[in-house]
Image: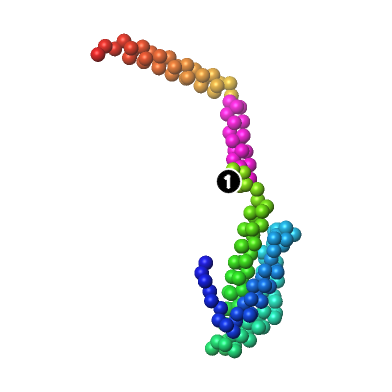
């Protein structure tokens, strides 16, 4: 992120915007409605008529922009950015308090890894008898080849 300096005429408006955003989205908002808390909170901030009207009046008074469309486009860019910045900060705090980590691994990741490990052990345990016999025979043959090679190495003279 970057640092944005607010000009003096817009400063009190920007403070009101930040307060409105702070009040609209809290950790309780996430607890009450986790599926669409971001959208609801942003919608409530964006629909604040006083904030929009004051922004338009400030822009007309302190800038050379006369077009209402341009002012509204600027508002539609600035306000969501402020919302997303604050929402992200609150969400990180909420996540730190509510998402349990085990051994520096998130719980979901650990559960998934455990399930994969369990599935693999079940798959290896359910070997058909024909395959098990063939595997055992290959192992016995390999062991006898190794033993024979060891005897040949011992009998070699240098």
Residue 39 sits in quarter: bottom right
What percent of the width, then of the height, locates residue 88?
Answer: 61, 62
Residue 143 sits in quarter: top left
* Residue at the left extreme, as displayed: 158
User: Considering the numbered disc 1 on the image, is that residue within a helix, a strand or a loop?
Assistant: loop
Residue 148 sits inside the magenta stretch: no
Residue 68: tell me if it is visible. no
Q: Is residue 4 left or right of residue 152?
A: right
Residue 119 sits inside the magenta stretch: yes
Q: Where 156 falls versus 99 (above or below)?
A: above
Q: Residue at x 64, y 58 (%)?
A: 93
Q: Where 36 falls versus 117 (above or below)?
A: below
Which residue is under mark 1?
A: 104
Q: Residue at x 62, y 34 (%)?
A: 118
Which range of residues does the magenta coloring cover? Answer: 107-127
Q: Where 24 falls versus 51 (above or below)?
A: above
Q: Residue at x 52, y 67 (%)?
A: 1
Residue 91: tell me if it is visible. yes
What percent of the width, then of the height, locates residue 60?
Answer: 59, 88
User: Badge 1 local density, few (<14 within 10 Å), some, or many (20+)?
Assistant: few
Overall secondary structure of the magenta section: helix
Q: Is residue 110 left or right of residue 3?
A: right
Image quadrant for the C terminus? top left
């Amino acid at each position: 992120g970057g640092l944005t300096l607010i000009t003096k005429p817009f400063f009190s408006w920007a403070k009101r915007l930040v307060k409105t955003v702070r009040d609209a989205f809290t950790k309780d908002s996430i607890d009450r409605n986790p599926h669409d808390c971001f959208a609801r909170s942003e919608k409530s901030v964006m629909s604040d008529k006083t904030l929009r009207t004051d922004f338009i009046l400030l822009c007309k008074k302190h800038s050379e922009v006369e077009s209402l469309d341009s002012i509204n486009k600027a508002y539609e860019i600035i306000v969501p950015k402020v919302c997303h910045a604050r929402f992200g900060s609150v969400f990180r705090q909420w996540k730190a308090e509510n998402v349990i980590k085990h051994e520096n691994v998130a719980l979901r990741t650990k559960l998934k890894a455990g399930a994969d490990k369990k599935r693999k052990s079940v798959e290896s345990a359910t070997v058909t008898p024909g395959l098990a016999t063939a595997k055992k025979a290959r192992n016995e043959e390999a062991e006898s080849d190794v033993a024979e090679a060891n005897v040949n190495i011992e009998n070699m003279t240098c």
